Amino acid sequence: MKVFILGIDVNRASSDPSLYPELTSSERYQLNHLDQTAQKIADFTSEARDYAPFAWGMQLKDTRPGQERDYTLQEAAFHHVVPFPMEDAFLPKTRMSVFPEHQEFFEKLQSEGYDTGVLMGFYAAECIYYSLSDLALTAKFRMVVPTELIADRNGTHPMNAFDDDSIIRAAYNGEIIFTSKQNALHFVQTPEDRRSLPYPTYTGESLNSMHYGMGS
């Protein structure tokens, strides 16, 4: 089982006061969970670095209506993860899903025998959701999602993003596996010829009946 790792929008556009001095203390507190998740992604990246290739899908513009602008190099630098520019594959994107603009990249991975991806990053209900849908349901990669390594915009529980019939069905069928960071790391670090899929911490059944409330 050949595995690649994909991070989506793992940038510093969060609670760093040097980047966003206009944020109030309450706004910065609300966004602090993004930095906490970015640090978990950094830890995972460090431990998984030698076992699988990494790619990073990054939106280089703020596309919010009335606030359109290019990110600064500082904002685009990955937060505690890898230097910018980097040796990893870098996939700039202008839409939520990384797949449409980089279909050839993912087709090349498949031609090289990669059949499974590990997905992490921001935001769960937006870029993660649409990238996951495209990669699992359209490109037919088996996708592993460590739930501690995704976060939603305003601190809502990220699993609320996946209350969707197609995602639930894929989870039932083992095409998408929502698991823990530790299970995902063990999976990646296991030699290729001995890998088995990580144990899901959220199954199709739990997705079908979930109400998770706020994130932690």
Image: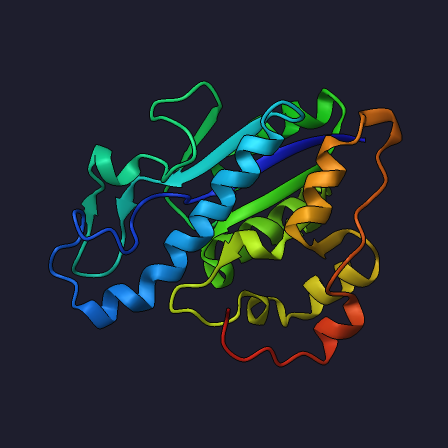
In this rendering, the answer to whether 124 lies above or below 192 is below
Identify the residue at image location x=37%, y=52%: 35
Q: Is residue 202 visible?
A: yes
The colour scheme applied to this rendered structure is: rainbow
Res. 184 image quadrant: top right
Identify the residue at image location x=18%, y=53%: 17
Position of 151 with respect to 147 (left or right) is: left
Position of 65 with respect to 187 (left or right) is: left
Position of 131 with respect to 87 (left or right) is: right
**Residue 22's spot in the image, x, y percent?**
11, 60
Res. 31 image quadrant: bottom left
Assign the N terminus to one quadrant of the image: top right
In this rendering, the answer to whether 147 lies above or below 208 is above
**Residue 114's spot in the image, x, y percent?**
73, 28
Res. 112 image quadrant: top right
Q: Foreground: 200 or 99? A: 200
